[in-house]
Image (tube, rainbow, N blue to C red):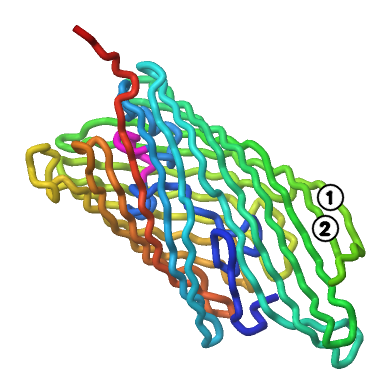
Amino acid sequence: MFFGSSLSVLAQNNTRSPYSMYGLGELRSQVNAVNTAMGGAGMAMSSQSFVNVLNPAANHGIDSLNVIFDTGVEGKYSQFKSQGETQNLNTGNFSYFSLGFRINSKISAGIGLNPFSSTGYEINSTASIDGVVDSKYPLNIIGTGDISRAWGVLTYDLLPNLHLGARTSFLFGSVKQTQYHNLSGLGNTSIYNETTNYFHNFYFEFGAQYEFKLQDYNISLGAIYNPGQKLVTKQENQTYNSSGTIMDDDTQYNGDFKIPEEFGFGIAVNSDKFLYLVDAGLQKWSDYDYKVKSVELKNTPYLRLGLQFTPSRNFMDSYFQKVNYRIGWRYAKSYLEMKGNQLEEYVVTFGLGLPIRNQSSRIDCAFELGSYGTTASRLIQENYIRLRVGFSLKDLWFQQRKFN
């Protein structure tokens, strides 16, 4: 709809992407600042100094006396390009909250909350009345809304070096689109078409991690699986005029939207100073029949690479020798294919892990330089810079105090 018009896109809420008008909106990153700085990789990492949400089995790394609290925020600057025009926009959002802890020597747990997807756009275009000559009028389309994810996870140490995990997530939220047909220039009453979709349901994820030593390297293998789940959807449609008179009102229930099946694998190789990460996986969005002209949902393969360098872990060394220096790269195909073009994303990442409180807690900063979409076929390309700042606080909550 908006690809044939001029590039006039404003946005609201937690995204400014015009692509967020399709499907479930713009899918938000589910990882924290540590993983973000390393290309989003980490399926084989354990939760030793932060809560790793990439794998439900990762919490085995939490010490029996420690509780880890993570939270983060992010800011994003985007430049959209299409048909020789550009527009610059920015956003700032809450990113994540998570808490990880041990229950006993074999079982650890965690809870968390983060955005799952966001919708936010304003499209200014024109339309005309079918069968009426010289009936062109302004059409304004506004989309807003968010879907959030609340989750809980359990990890079980089946063997000293084999760990299994399961996470239950509850998705909830709504997405609203309002179409304003400005018919005043034609001598008619303007019309509003408002559609609101409400989503909710549980879905499950499973994971495993296996650790072993090879010469001087500590190696971990990770795997995840999500069987997919349809979302319970209620759609409310309302049409009213500029005076507020309701012309049409109806509610429908369906299960058209779904969380796709996903599987992924990762490896982590840890030496004295270096940590190497590789993740790869696939989300099977093509199983979903999306009924929008010129738009199809496709499978989304992804590849993520990460590297961390820590000069020293000695408490007595200088501060900057104890800092974690991180870089990464990731590639993913979008779940959207438009006009025969499956959208792609390329991202380069880097960041720092800054120790505080005698190295038990950290401030993590991650930068992403990314490109999403294409200008081919009159589509829109987004180039962006994103900063994510996370706070990982590690404390001794279950230590028994002794008094003389």
Q: Do tag 2 and tag 1 residues touch (Cβ < 8 Å)?
A: yes
Amino acid carrying mark 1 in the image:
Gln
Q: CA distance from mark 2 to mark 1?
A: 8 Å
Question: Residue 234, how many percent across, how many down?
Answer: 77, 48
Instruction: Give the residue drawn at x 75%, y 61%.
Output: 291
- Count the marks: 2
Query: Tag on residue 34?
Result: none
Question: Residue 25, how many percent across, how many down?
Answer: 61, 58
Q: Is residue 208 visible?
A: no
Label 2 packing within 10 angstroms: few (<14), some (14-19), many (20+):
some
Marked residue nearer the N-terminal end (2 or 1) = 2
Relative to residue 87, is residue 109 depicted above or below?
Answer: above
Question: Residue 127, how many percent across, how many down?
Answer: 78, 82
Q: Is residue 150 left or right of residue 233?
A: left
Q: Which residue is mark 2?
A: 237
Instruction: Give the residue drawn at x 46%, y 50%.
Output: 95
- Which residues make up the magenta segment? 42-50
Q: Give the position of the N terminus as an image quadrant.
A: bottom right
> Nearest the camera: 194 or 281?
194
Instruction: Give the residue drawn at x 71%, y 59%.
Output: 176
Q: Nearer the viewer, mark 2 or mark 1?
A: 2
Q: Is residue 325 magenta?
A: no
Q: Which residue is mark 1?
A: 252
Question: Residue 342, how many percent across, how many down?
Answer: 56, 67
